[in-house]
Image (spheres, grey):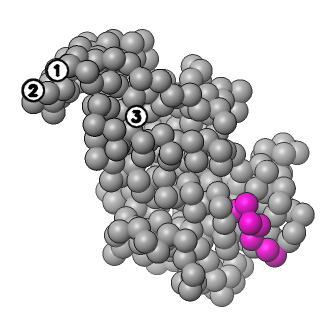
Amino acid sequence: MNVTFEERASLHGYRIGIASLDAPASLNALSLPMIDALQDRLQAWAENADIACVLLRGNGSKAFCAGGDVVQLAKKCLASPGDAPELAERFFAREYRLDHYLHTYPKPLICWAHGHVLGGGMGLLQGAGIRIVTPSSRLAMPEISIGLFPDVGGSHFLSRLPGKLGLFFGLTASPMNARDALDLNLADRFLLDSQQDALIEGLVQLNWRDQPDLQLHSLLKALEQQAHYELPAAQWLPRRERIDALLDQATLPLSWNALASLENDDDALLAKAAKTLLGGSPLTGHLVCEQIRRARHLSLAQVFQMEYGMSLSCCRHPEFAEGVRARLIDKDHAPRWHWPDVASVPAEVIAAHFTTLSDHPLADLA
C-alpha cells in the first residue's frame, strides 16, 4: 500500500503517530490503497487517547507528494470514452473524504511538505493543522496540463488567495517556494530539510499533559528561528500587481490571452507561466475560473461535494484522458485537446461539470 506507520513513545505514556508516504519512485503519488490506509490509521489514532500528535510526511528526498496516481484512472477513461469509471467514483470520493477529515482532525496534525507538493499533495498539506515547508518545497496545482482542474479543495484555497493569484496559479501551474507559501497562508512554518529529526525528537520530549499547545508552539518557534536564514525570496507577491492587472478581464478567454501574451516576456517566471498555460487545456481554464467564482460562497464541505461532481464530469469528457496520455503515459507532451481554442469551449460543456448529483457519496460531510 506504500504507506508506513509507526508510533514513538513520549512522556507519561503518550505516543507520537508518524504516517509516511512510501512510494518515492512515483514521488509518493497517492493511490487508492494509500488513501484508504491513511484514512483508517488516522481515524484509529484520533480515537486513541494515548496518541498525542500525528506527523504526516513523505519518504525520499524529492517529494512529499506529487499528486494522485491518475494513470490507471486515465487508462480506464480511455478504454470507455464518455463514461466515468467506477474507479473514479471510488478514488475521488475517498480522496476528498480524507482531505476533509484532515481539516477537522481533533489532534495536532503536522504535515512536513518538502520537495514537490503537487495536486493531491496540496490537498493533504492544506488539511493539516500545522503546515511545514522547507527550502526544497515547491507547491503547485498542475492540473491544467492534464485536463483536470485544481481539486482536493483547490476551489477553497485558491479562491481565498489575494487578488487574482488563485486564478493565476490555477491557469499556469506556477510553483510556489516556501516564502510564497507563507506569504499566501498556504503554510505555517519554515524549517530546514535537515530539521525533521529534531522536530520528531522535540515532539517526543514534550510533556503532553501540561499545556501541550503552548509547548508545541514554543518548539516550532525555536526550530524556525534556527532556519530563518535559508528562507528564499518571495516570487509572487512582488508580481501580484502586474498579475492582477493582466487578469482584470471580463471573460476567461480575455484573461487567457492576456497571460499568453507573456510568452516572450523579460520576466522569466511570467514567461514560463505563459508557456505552461499555452500547453494546457482550455476547458480546464474555464473550469478554474468558474470553480473559483463559485467557491467564494461555499463551505469547505460544499467545495468537496462540488469538486466530486466536477471530477466525474472530467472523466466523461476527453480532455482528462488525453492530457494524462500525453504527459504521463506516452509522454509525447503534445496533447491533442478536443477544444484547442479557449474561445470555442461550449458553455453547455462547462455547465455540465457543475451539475448537482442526486445520490452524492459525500452528502454527509459538514
Q: Quadrant of residue 211?
A: top left
Depth check: give the residue in front, 240 or 189: 189
Question: How many other residues sit within 10 Å of disc 1, few (<14), some (14-19) or many (≥20)?
Answer: some
Q: Quarter holding the N terminus?
A: top right
Instruction: Identify the mark nearer the N-term, 2 or 3.
Output: 3
Q: Are marks 2 and 3 in contact (CB under 8 Å)?
A: no
Question: How many other residues sit within 10 Å of disc 2, few (<14), some (14-19) or many (≥20)?
Answer: few
**Which residue in the protein does label 3 denote?**
111
Q: Residue at x 66, y 87 (%)?
A: 348
Q: Are marks 1 and 2 in contact (CB under 8 Å)?
A: yes
**Which residue in the protein does label 2 denote?**
210
**Which residue in the protein does label 1 denote?**
207
On the image, the x and y values in percent for residue 243 come to 42, 55
Q: Are marks 1 and 3 in contact (CB under 8 Å)?
A: no
Q: Is residue 225 above or below residue 140?
A: above
Question: How many other residues sit within 10 Å of disc 3, few (<14), some (14-19) or many (≥20)?
Answer: many
Structural distance between the alpha carbons of marks 1 and 2: 6 Å
Which one is in front in this view, the residue at disc 1 or the one at disc 3?
1
Q: Is residue 185 above or below residue 130?
A: below
**Label 2 is placed on what type of residue?**
Asp
Q: Residue at x 43, y 71 (%)?
A: 364
On the image, the x and y values in percent for residue 79 come to 90, 63
**Label 3 is placed on what type of residue?**
Cys
